[in-house]
Amino acid sequence: MTLVEALACERCGRRYAPADVEYTCPEHDGVAGILDVRYEYDAVSDELAGVLDGPTEDLWTYEPLLPVDGEPVRLGAGGTDLLDAPALGDALGVDALVKNETTNPTGSNKDRGSAVAVSRARQQGHDVVACASTGNAAASLAGYAARAGLDCRIFVPADLPEAKAVQPRLYGATVLGVDGTYADAYELCREVSAERGWYNRNAAMNPYAVEGKRTLGFELAEQAPDADWVAMPMGNGCSLAGAWKGLREFERLGVVEDTPKLLGVQAAGATAIHDRFVAESDDSDAGSRTGEREDGGDTTADSIDVGVPHNAGKACRALAESGGDAVVVSDEAIRDAQRLLGECEGVFAEPASAAAVAGIRAAVDRGTVAPGERVVTVATGTGLKDSASAREAVDDVISVDAAGQGLPEDL
Ligand SMILES: [Zn+2]
């Protein structure tokens, strides 16, 4: 038995039993009525002591707080390290920590959402799971589907980095390269999944995928209860909103006394959430959708190259509730930060993750983050899937013959 009390519509407040709805509130068109899973928090509180006493093996350590009945699908997501990052901190002028999500089983934080969504799909008797993705969610869903014995269909923009298109196929998924933007792939996935009865993992509409993302917040609360800031990249906005829900729940349950401020970071070519947050903060143009790009974004950070983010509202609420802020960084700053993170701490993160590091620097420069504050940067995904873009951030190989000719004297 799960401790789920109801699914509540974020737009109209209607509440549903888990058996009565699959994705969004039926009262609205499309994905307007995102559902939020609510729990019996008194009962959760009783279960929590047992959870917090032991080590966090993986995200299923938090099973009493997750909406899955029966045996979950296990591949090792969650329970990732929080690394002290003194050299990175010196470079940025803060007390830095790195939450290393690159070590999740398929290489990104998306495994947290997939673990819960695929467990739910199997529990509900689905044979096929599907999603649209800029890459990491595709690999993640495919890996978890393989583990669960389910078929998997992936919709990706056709210009996806090669390695990101290979990984899901290796897990046995069928990959459909859509001639269009991420938004086009998303809509096609939604329509076809509804027609053919496939289980749609997309976190923008699947309430269970978001629940897995909360576990990042649980771990941050446990590992860094004294953090002043948590910096995260924002694409669709789901991961940041999910982590915030987890942080807030652990505060509400008395696990921690306080929550950190969130620093949401976007690339200069895809700024819709940042722009909306700034507009709402100014109160001059509240609720505006400035910055959306129907033709897709334009940045080297493909994982956050989202022109029309589906969860911008949730992300902006999370930023505001936390007392945090949003910043935008250039592709050049992202490349510099990718190398900085690698050189300083031995973490090879993808450009989207490096954006969070660049965002800390930008926030310090403009006085949002004070020097010396304790800042966790979330390295959301590995850089190994896209070495072509990392190539632009590194030096050339030095050619040396077998006798050592060409070896620099000053090395
Ligand atoms: Zn509703």
Image: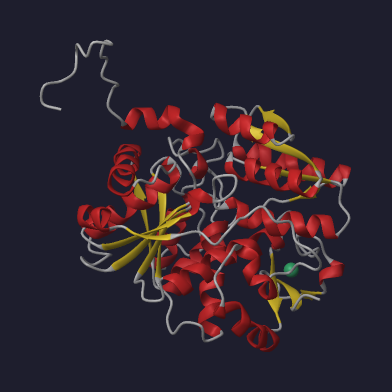
- Name the residue nearer the viewer: 303 or 45: 45
Where residue 265 appears, as percent x and y from the top left, is 40, 53
Where residue 204 appears, as percent x and y from the top left, is 65, 55
The residue positioned 72% from the left and 57% from the top of the image is 117
Count of picture labels: 0
The residue positioned 68% from the left and 50% from the top of the image is 202
Question: Could one spot residue 204 in this view of the protein?
Answer: no
Q: Compared with residue 370, is residue 85 higher up or lower down, i.e. above or below?
A: above
Q: Residue furthest left?
A: 410
Quarter of the image containing the C terminus?
Answer: top left
Where residue 33 appears, as percent x and y from the top left, is 71, 63
Q: Is residue 405 left or right of residue 331?
A: left
Question: Quarter for ligand 1?
Answer: bottom right
Where residue 408 appears, as percent x and y from the top left, is 15, 20
Question: Could one spot residue 36 in this view of the protein?
Answer: yes
Q: Residue furthest front?
A: 403
Quarter of the image containing the N terminus?
Answer: bottom right
- Name the residue nearer the viewer: 1 or 267: 1
Q: Is residue 155 left or right of residue 409?
A: right
